[in-house]
Amino acid sequence: TNEGKEFLKKFLKVYTDIIYSEKYDGFISKTIIEGHVAPISGVTYESGLPLSKQRAENVKNYCLSDQTGVDTSKLESMLEAKGYSQSRPVYDSNGEFDIEASRRVSFTFVVNVN
């Protein structure tokens, strides 16, 4: 969505400012872009996997595109897209599946601590 793209532009600006800085050079070794789908009736892990992978790939491709206005040349080797289908749903405060919140892309950072 346009809203998602605007969020990613802001995120990438801050993220690259940090990881490109001398102070944090090498601190984050990998960023995993995780695609998820909602756990709805009739959708199996296998049937939801292609959509979740595509969501993650779309975000990765956008992050690496020139549309962001950010130099992401160093990110290509650091970004990995993975699909998780419906294996990691989001729950609401009543313990029920939150369908809208489960349809998402999230980021996981692999940090080098030594």
Image (cartoon, helix red, strand yellow):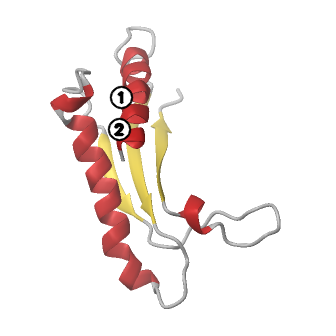
Q: Amino acid at mark 2?
A: Lys
Say which residue appears at 40% left-offset and 77% top-offset: 48
Say which residue appears at 51% left-offset and 73% top-offset: 86
In front of the other: 79 or 36: 36
* Residue 34 location, quadrant: bottom left
Q: Amino acid at mark 1?
A: Lys
Residue 9 got which mark? 1
The x, y position of residue 98, in whole percent, is 65, 66
Residue 5 got which mark? 2
Q: Is residue 22 left or right of residue 114?
A: left
Task: Tell me the SS state at disc 1.
Answer: helix
Figure check: 105 above or below 75: below
Q: CA distance from mark 2 to mark 1?
A: 6 Å
Say which residue appears at 27% left-offset and 54% top-offset: 57
Q: Is residue 88 left or right of residue 107?
A: right
Check whether the beta carbons of the residues at disc 2 and disc 1 lie within 8 A of each other. yes
The x, y position of residue 111, in whole percent, is 49, 34
